[in-house]
Image (cartoon, rainbow, N blue to C red):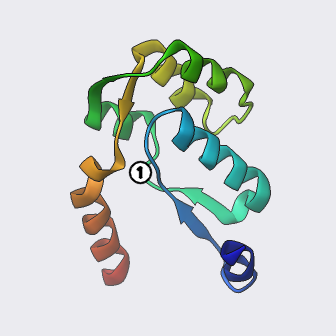
Amino acid sequence: MLLDKIIEDVDEIYYSGDFGPEGIIIANKLKMRYGDKLKFWRFSVEDYLKIISHKEISHTSKAKLDNIKNDELSFLIERIKEKGLAGYQEMLIEDYIKDIINMMIV
């Protein structure tokens, strides 16, 4: 896996994804695999609420979230289950760009 090679040479790697079961499952798997080297980027309850859509998450998909036991994701998981709506990372593009610019300035 490409990330396995990259992670050997860096101190940290960032993950951001869609706010729905699939994105959360990917986030959890990556966190389990890479531990403290993996940082969630724009993957908070605040970010989710900022870009929440009207696309409902099915009960079957929401049930997948019950199997995830990750303290860093627990508040986000609860809010997604509560709202029952997905959020899409494309809506955060301007924030990602601002973050990258700010990282380059520092």
What residue did someone put label 1 on?
A: 42
- Expressed as whole percent of the image width and height from the top left, the position of residue 98 reads 25, 66
Between 2 and 70, which is closer to the camera in this rendering?
A: 2
Q: Is residue 106 visible?
A: no
Q: Residue at x 65, y 61 (%)?
A: 38
Q: Residue at x 37, y 35 (%)?
A: 48
Secondary structure of the residue carrying tag 1 is loop
Residue 67, compared with residue 72, is above or below; it is: above
| Among the 4 quarters of the image, the one containing residue 54 | top left
Between 28 and 22, which is closer to the camera in this rendering?
A: 22
- Would you say 102 lies left or right of 35 here? left
Q: Residue at x 48, y 17 (%)?
A: 58
- Expressed as whole percent of the image width and height from the top left, the position of residue 59 reads 53, 13
Quadrant where the C terminus sits is bottom left
Q: Residues within 10 Å of mark 1 (few under 14, many from 20)?
A: some
Between 103 and 81, which is closer to the camera in this rendering?
A: 81
Residue at the farthest left position: 94
Residue at the farthest bottom position: 9
- Expressed as whole percent of the image width and height from the top left, the position of residue 30 reads 68, 55
- Would you say 14 lies left or right of 56 here? right
Quadrant where the N terminus sits is bottom right
Residue 102, compared with residue 62, is above or below; it is: below
